[in-house]
Amino acid sequence: MTKTYAAARPHRRFEDLTVGESRRSTSRTVTLQEIVEFARQYDPQWFHTDPESAKQSVFGEVVASGIHVLALWRQMDHEINSDIDWVCGIGWDELRLKRAIRAGDTIHVTSRIVSLKPSATRADRGTAMTRYAVVLDDGTEAVTFTSINLVYTRAAQEH
């Protein structure tokens, strides 16, 4: 299931965000076909691409590449945070791949703003630190990290 998103400029600026603000995406089920197709193109390791050989891996079956899971996160994050006027992401802290994603797993994404800091040098932006998780429907966090992002302020509209 591929979603597309409008390219219109988002309306929420740095001043509209609040520490503690939390959001949750809808759920999606990951398929064997998408795991294998993604891995064949971007991460062609045998335990991502070959269901028969993957039975001999520590996972016992094909698992999604970590890069694939992060691509799924990115897609699902657009669902819940595309109304924020991001300048760009500038880093991730404490990225952890805690649990492999397997075919048939149903996942969703959560986000929680953990800090907001206006720029000391640029009036048109501030920094938002957001804790993200890719979560299985049983509540297990499969991937976690803190994303460091620049967000436009209202002052950016004046230029």
Image: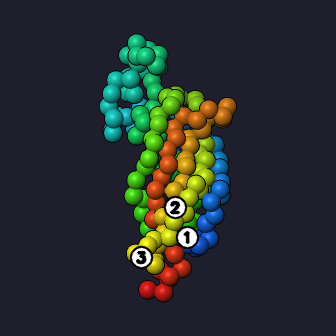
| SS for dot 1 | helix
Q: Is the residue under label 2 in contact with that under label 1 (CB below 8 Å)?
A: yes
Q: Nearer the viewer, residue 57 or 93?
A: 93
Q: Please state if 157 lies on the left or on the right of 46 as rendered.
A: right
Res 37 seen here: no
First in sequence: mark 3 vs mark 1: 1
Is 155 placed above or below 41 here?
below
Callout 3: 10 Å neighbours few (<14), some, many (20+)? few
Is 143 placed above or below 16 here?
above
Q: Nearer the viewer, residue 84 or 128?
A: 128
Q: Please state if 46 lies on the left or on the right of 146 as rendered.
A: left
Residue type, label 2? Ala
The residue that mark 2 highlights is 128
Q: Could you tell me how far apart the alpha carbons at marks 1 and 2 are, in whole angstroms?
A: 8 Å
Q: Could you tell me how far apart the alpha carbons at marks 2 and 3 are, in whole angstroms?
A: 14 Å
Q: Residue at point 61% right, 66% down?
A: 17
First in sequence: mark 1 vs mark 2: 1
**Can you tell which mark lies on residue 26?**
none
Is 138 placed above or below 154 here?
above
The residue that mark 3 highlights is 122
**Can you tell which mark lies on residue 14?**
1
Res 90 seen here: yes
Q: Residue 83 location in percent, x, y?
A: 58, 66
Q: Quadrant of the N terminus?
A: top right
Callout 1: 10 Å neighbours few (<14), some, many (20+)? many
Q: Is the residue under label 3 in contact with that under label 2 (CB below 8 Å)?
A: no
- Number of numbered discs visible in the structure rendering: 3
Q: Residue 98 location in percent, x, y?
A: 50, 31
| SS for dot 2 | strand
